[in-house]
Image: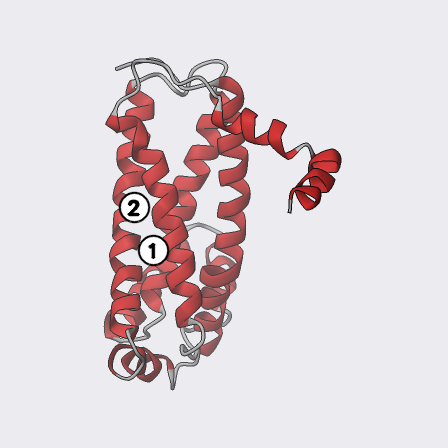
Amino acid sequence: MSKVYDWFEERLEIQAIADDITSKYVPPHVNIFYCLGGITLTCFLVQVATGFAMTFYYRPTVTDAFASVQYIMTEVNFGWLIRSVHRWSASMMVLMMILHVFRVYLTGGFKKPRELTWVTGVVLGVLTASFGVTGYSLPWDQIGYWAVKIVTGVPEAIPVIGSPLVELLRGSASVGQSTLTRFYSLHTFVLPLLTAVFMLMHFLMIRKQGISGPL
């Protein structure tokens, strides 16, 4: 076993990477409020795991979406638990994100040289809200349907480009199968990918620049 490790160590310098990760200096002023970003990340990972599990049973069609959610809740082993964890961790993720933004703002985490860290954090906040909007529609019940109809109708107030934006979001002039397909694709592929990319950028910059000052 040691020979295998030595082979990888010689080529990848695993020990040096491990030492770099575990030896980062943590300022003495850090307290529990500085854990809000990490809790948000944990909620995101829970979202990915539980969401992935539900994709095996969820059917993104206007005729089957609601029934497939009911099937997950009543027929799939521990399906009710998986969906409940997904739902509550989503709410927790939004709450932790909001608290994290307030903490960073109060400690001046947006000031030089952390401007780009702040920008990526704001983008992550927008992506988190987008998760909520797109995920809310997927059960395709009355609440989900009307939520989609209202949200996608908001851009219509914008002059000139309003109507094309609405049609782009819905996939047609009205809310239907195209809308659900687009929201499902956004929720399960586009948003997770973008979130992972911006999280990586965010954490790398934090690691490079260090943690901002105390409250």
**Tag 1 residue:** 132
Checking the image for residue 79, the label placed there is: none
**Residue type, label 1:** Gly
For this rendering, which residue is in front, 35 or 98? 35
Can you say whether 67 is above or below 4 in the image?
A: below
For this rendering, which residue is in front, 96 or 26? 26
Residue 155, image x, y percentages = 41, 54
Residue 152, quarter of the rendered image: bottom left
Q: Secondary structure at mark 2?
A: helix
Mark 1 and 2 residues: CB-CB less than 8 Å, in contact? yes
User: In this view of the protein, can residue 114 be seen by the observer?
Assistant: yes
Q: Residue at x 25, y 43 (%)?
A: 95
Can you say whether 17 is above or below 81 in the image?
A: above
**Tag 2 residue:** 94
For this rendering, which residue is in front, 185 or 58? 58
Q: Classify mark 1: residues with Cα within 10 Å, few (<14), some (14-19) or many (20+).
A: some
Q: Residue at x 30, y 74 (%)?
A: 79
Earlier residue among tags 1 and 2: 2
Residue 159 left/right relative to 95 = right
**Residue type, label 2:** Val
Residue 42, image x, y percentages = 36, 45
Q: Classify mark 2: residues with Cα within 10 Å, few (<14), some (14-19) or many (20+).
A: some
Residue 134, image x, y percentages = 39, 61
For this rendering, which residue is in front, 14 or 68? 14
Can you say whether 114 is above or below 64 in the image?
A: above
Residue 54, image x, y percentages = 39, 71
